[in-house]
């Protein structure tokens, strides 16, 4: 792994180098004291044991978040645990194996889980609120805007929004899929300064700690490189449904949007309070350049429906010239997409360089690939746009 990817004092022996690394770590942690709005994601493994909610863990989490809120920081909670909360009340000792069974457990458990949060937050004089979301809420621009308005109004009124995926009605087509990704979406929606993912791990390690006893905790990640993905156990291009892979994906979304993310151990006492005071806990992922809310939505709030491979001339026009993507620069088209869907743009070397809202569907785009703009009407019989993706609807990826 390249030294530039992360900052780790134990890996350096030169005192001057150690001092520089320490200063960089402290600088990154010092900025946490200026955070005004946070999203905290809590996993099922942190607030439940043996498929049952752990009351003591829930008590500790609420006390921690209420403390932070009382200190003037706006708090949004993305919580797992609905299925675990529902199982005892359905007389079940094992997790259902069918989708309807999981939906039923979530439907029963969501009420119980929210009641548990409400009772505890009210003890500290805090007012919780609830939002149940699906991928469709993020993909549709109008719904996204309405959701954004509702969330910001809840924050202005002083509530603590508690968010979960609407598991009782979600099916594969409309699921975000995991609460790590959901928390990244919510961070962008709220334009929060920091996402904290509370896990059953102390943070991000140099290798999988379950299989390698010699791993070390990485306190600061500057760049989510291929080596970082490999340290998580899989390459970044492979599919993953949980564990550190989804947390890295969340970090990629949040840091590319210009915000910070931390992975920390969820049962560490007052972990959120201590993190915001700059204590060296967990792993801090440093941000890239901040982008606007609309560009966050285009790039990171809806999965791409397809991808385009573009030639080097088009790549240079996008990156260096700030130009739109024209038909002539497209080499190949993959996927099935419609007008205004999000589509990825890959360079010839296989690196994804941009995402944008497409002006033509996949059939039309395939016909136009490699052709000149003046030929659009003769090929399609109509000419709605010169550009395949207009630069105003395109986001370059770091």
Image: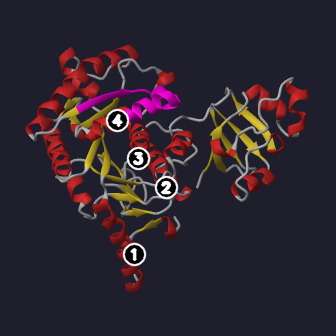
Q: Earlier in the sequence, mark 4 or mark 1?
A: 1
Q: Are marks 4 and 3 in contact (CB under 8 Å)?
A: no
Q: Are marks 4 and 1 in contact (CB under 8 Å)?
A: no
Q: Whole-Å distance between the Cαs marked 4 and 1?
A: 38 Å
Quadrant in the rendering for residue 58: top left
What scheme was used to colour the molecule?
A: secondary structure
Q: Whole-Å distance between the Cαs marked 4 and 3?
A: 11 Å
Q: Residues within 10 Å of mark 1 (few under 14, many from 20)?
A: some
Q: At which x and y percent is residue 320? A: 71, 59
Q: Is residue 183 left or right of residue 364?
A: left
Q: Whole-Å distance between the Cαs marked 2 and 4?
A: 21 Å
Q: At which x and y percent is residue 137? A: 45, 28
Q: Which residue is mark 3?
A: 191
Q: Which disc number belongs to residue 151? A: 4
Judged by its main secondary structure, the magenta piece is: helix
Q: Residues within 10 Å of mark 2 (few under 14, many from 20)?
A: few
User: Is 63 part of what is drawn in magenta?
Assistant: no
Q: Secondary structure at mark 2?
A: loop
């Amino acid at each position: 792994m390249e030294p530039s990817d992360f900052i780790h004092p134990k890996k350096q022996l030169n005192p001057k180098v150690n001092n520089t690394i320490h200063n960089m770590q402290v600088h990154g942690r010092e900025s946490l004291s200026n955070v005004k709005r946070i999203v905290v994601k809590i996993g099922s493994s942190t607030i439940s044991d043996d498929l049952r909610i752990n009351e003591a863990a829930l008590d500790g989490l609420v006390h921690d978040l209420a403390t932070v809120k009382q200190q003037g920081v706006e708090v949004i909670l993305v919580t797992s645990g609905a299925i675990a909360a529902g199982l005892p009340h359905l007389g079940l000792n094992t997790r259902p194996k069918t989708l309807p069974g999981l939906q039923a457990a979530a439907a029963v458990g969501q009420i119980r889980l929210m009641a548990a949060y409400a009772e505890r937050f009210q003890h500290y004089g805090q007012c919780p609120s609830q939002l149940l979301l699906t991928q469709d809420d993020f993909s549709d621009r109008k719904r996204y805007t309405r959701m954004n308005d509702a969330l910001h109004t809840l924050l202005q009124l002083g509530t603590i929004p508690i968010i979960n995926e609407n598991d009782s009605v979600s099916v594969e087509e409309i699921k975000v899929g995991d609460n790590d990704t959901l928390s990244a979406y919510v961070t962008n929606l709220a334009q929060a300064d920091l996402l904290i993912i509370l896990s059953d791990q102390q943070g991000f390690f140099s290798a999988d700690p379950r299989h390698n006893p010699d791993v070390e905790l990485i306190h600061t990640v500057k760049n989510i490189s291929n080596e970082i993905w490999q340290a998580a156990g899989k390459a970044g291009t492979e599919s993953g449904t949980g564990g550190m892979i989804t947390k890295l994906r969340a970090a990629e979304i949040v840091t590319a949007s210009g915000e910070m993310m931390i992975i920390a151990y969820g049962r560490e006492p007052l972990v959120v309070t201590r993190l915001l005071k700059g204590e060296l806990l967990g792993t801090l992922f440093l941000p890239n350049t901040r982008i606007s809310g609309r560009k966050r939505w285009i790039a990171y709030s809806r999965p791409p429906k397809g991808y385009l491979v573009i030639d080097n001339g088009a790549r240079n026009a996008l990156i260096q010239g700030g130009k739109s993507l024209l038909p002539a620069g497209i080499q190949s088209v993959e996927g099935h997409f419609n007008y205004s869907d999000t589509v990825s743009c890959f360079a010839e070397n296989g690196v994804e360089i941009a995402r944008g809202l497409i002006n033509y569907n996949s059939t039309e785009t395939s016909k136009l690939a490699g052709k000149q703009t003046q030929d659009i009407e003769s090929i399609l019989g109509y000419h709605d746009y010169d550009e395949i993706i207009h630069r105003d609807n395109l986001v370059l990826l770091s």
